[in-house]
Image: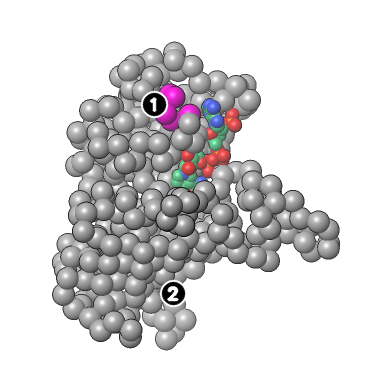
Amino acid sequence: MAINLAILGATGAVGQELLRLLEARALPLGELRLLASPRSAGRQLQFRGETRTVQAVSPESFEGIDVAIFSAGGGTSREWAPIAASKGACVIDNSSAWRMDPEVPLVVPECNLEAGRARPKGIIANPNCSTIQMVVALKPLHDAAGVKRVVVATYQAISGAGARAIEAFQEQCRAAANGEAVDPGPLKGQLAQNLLMHWSVDEASGYQEEELKMVHETRKILGDESIQVSPTAVRVPVLHAHSESLTIELGRPMDAAEARTLLAAAPGITLVDDFAAGAYPTPLTAAGTDPVYVGRIREDVGNPGGLQMWVVSDNLRKGAALNAVQIAEGLFA
Ligand SMILES: NC(=O)c1ccc[n+]([C@@H]2O[C@H](COP(=O)([O-])OP(=O)(O)OC[C@H]3O[C@@H](n4cnc5c(N)ncnc54)[C@H](OP(=O)(O)O)[C@@H]3O)[C@@H](O)[C@H]2O)c1
């Protein structure tokens, strides 16, 4: 059955990746509507060799639509997702607006696709990009031995902050190389030759909201409120693909060989794990590809029985667009 699909945020970093994925994948498409704010109305985008015109979102945009993938920020989702759902569309939302709503399933197909079938609000939430790649890697270990605690440090790419952030970073590099003053712009600081931590901050805890998303979303997706997550999120001067260092404590001791066997058999994961030979995942090799790459699987020298590993994935693909398309394929195709 062909699916009538709308993309809200079609002009953005995730929206553009969605179009590239839909061109290449087998999801049977009927009508495809490209939506954005009035700023981009009339802009022309290419899809499968045809020119498509972007429309400003309106209530009529969702008439006759089966699935609406939203990638347009939390405020836009809060405003438009109930409208789209009231027209009969299933909204798959990339923003953080609905993720912790108890009536909205938070879905990573490798972990809990079936949760997406019960959606009283007509909305399915896509998790945060850093959470998605982490839970894909944790899931087989959790099923085998129960994840008790994860200490995670992220090394997050600029494209995670949207299309304008990429342009701003390129301008920052040029200015820094020429000894000119650097405009912080949407990156909220100089990332050229630097690292930043500047997502919005939860004043009570001192954590960044990006970090707290990893705590709460991990528990919801894996269905286990007892999992402890200790996160630190860092923006690095890399264009695409987030990297994460994970230190994991399980319900029973697990050696690296068993972890490697479990991870190698798990869906969505590609092992790149021959560190002695120089083989480990990097953002450059992950960018533009679909898998969650796992490498440097090793027994934790600081906590016998625990594990450490390195997880890299393209934030625009598995961290956003691909996960949304996989939900649509899994539930509607
Ligand atoms: N980037 C990632 O790696 C990533 C990963 C996971 C989740 N997400 C989430 O996905 C969403 C989009 O991220 P992005 O990186 O693609 O951002 P982006 O590059 O800044 O794109 C934002 C998109 O939203 C549209 N938009 C903004 N305000 C709107 C409004 N009031 N009404 C209708 N459309 C509006 C923009 O349209 P105009 O062209 O008209 O401005 C543009 O198409 C965010 O919620 C983000 O948190 C992003």
Q: Residue at x 26, y 50 (%)?
A: 221
| Quarter occupied by the C terminus | top left
Residue 216, image x and y in percent? Answer: 32, 51
- Pointer 1: what residue? 81
Residue 306 at least partly seen: yes
What SS does tag 1 mark? helix
Corner quadrant of residue 296: bottom left
Is residue 170 magenta-colored? Answer: no
Cα separation between marks 1 and 2: 40 Å
- What secondary structure do most residues of the magenta stretch adopt? helix
Q: Nearer the viewer, residue 328 or 176?
A: 176
Name the kind of residue labelled 2 in the image: Tyr
What SS does tag 2 mark? loop
Is residue 77 magenta-colored? Answer: yes
Corner quadrant of residue 79: top left
* 21 horizontally vs 174: left or right: left
Q: Residue at x 43, y 30 (%)?
A: 77
Q: Nearer the viewer, residue 231 or 39?
A: 231
Corner quadrant of residue 116: top left
- Pointer 2: what residue? 280
Report the mark closest to the observer, 1 or 2. Answer: 1
